[in-house]
């Protein structure tokens, strides 16, 4: 165990145990919980005076860290819609205004969710035909740099 100097000083000031590397588990605060890693999406992202963004609007398997990218895209889209509404003098909670955000983002998010769900099933599957399809598809993607570039940019939200 290695104790960091700052942790030792903080522990002396507070009367607590110093932080050690690696941390030592001394007990469980509660029982473990499991969270379903499948994707889900709200039927609509907006209502009167309400707009759902990020994980409130959609959940996605954590593969490739796309949840954060989708949430950032949601916020950017909603901000643009609200800015446009403010400049036009519209009520920012108007369902008609907010529905523009829903119409823009929900299809984008559903496409990414669907694609990642397919990848999750392909990479989580062990039957030989699925392994062959996955490996052949990945090899083909790597063999065609322009296609790989398009897929990569789409995954990055560009």
Image: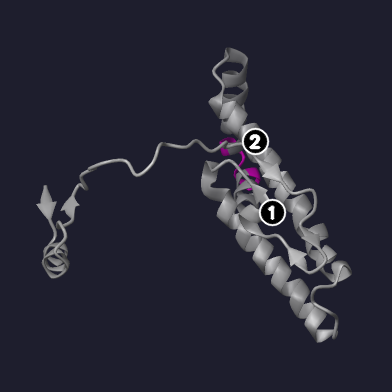
Q: What's drawn in magenta, residue-wise? A: 142-147
In front of the other: 8 or 128: 8
Q: Does residue 86 appear anywhere in the picture?
A: yes
Residue 130 versus residue 38 in the image, above or below? above
Q: What secondary structure prevails in the magenta region?
A: helix
In this view of the protein, which residue sits in the foreground, 59 or 26? Answer: 26
Rendering coords of residue 155 (x, y %): 61, 50
Q: Comparing marks 1 and 2, which lies closer to the viewer?
A: 1
Left or right: 1, with 128 as reference point: left
Give coordinates of residue 146: x percent, y percent: 64, 47
Residue linked to disc 2: 117
Helix, strand or loop under label 1: loop
Mark 1, residues whose alpha carbon is within 10 Å: few (<14), some, or many (≥20)? many
Which quadrant holds residue 27?
A: top left
Q: Tell me: residue 1, above or below residue 122.
A: below
Residue at 11% from the left image edge and 66% from the top image edge? 12
Q: Can residue 70 be seen here?
A: no
Residue pointed to by mark 1: 57
């Amino acid at each position: 165990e290695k104790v960091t100097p700052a942790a030792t000083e903080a522990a002396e000031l507070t009367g607590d145990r110093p932080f050690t590397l690696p941390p030592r588990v001394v007990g469980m605060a509660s029982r473990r919980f499991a969270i379903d890693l499948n994707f889900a999406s709200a039927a609509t992202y907006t209502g009167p005076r309400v707009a759902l963004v990020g994980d409130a609007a959609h959940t996605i398997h954590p593969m490739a860290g796309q949840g954060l990218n989708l949430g950032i895209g949601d916020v950017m889209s909603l901000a643009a819609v609200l800015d446009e509404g403010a400049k036009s003098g519209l009520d920012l909670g108007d369902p008609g205004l907010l529905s523009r955000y829903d119409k823009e983002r929900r299809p984008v998010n559903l496409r990414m969710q669907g694609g990642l769900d397919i990848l999750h099933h392909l990479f989580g599957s062990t039957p030989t035909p699925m392994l062959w399809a996955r490996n052949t598809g990945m090899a083909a993607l790597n063999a065609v740099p322009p296609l790989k570039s398009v897929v990569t940019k789409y995954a990055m939200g560009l």
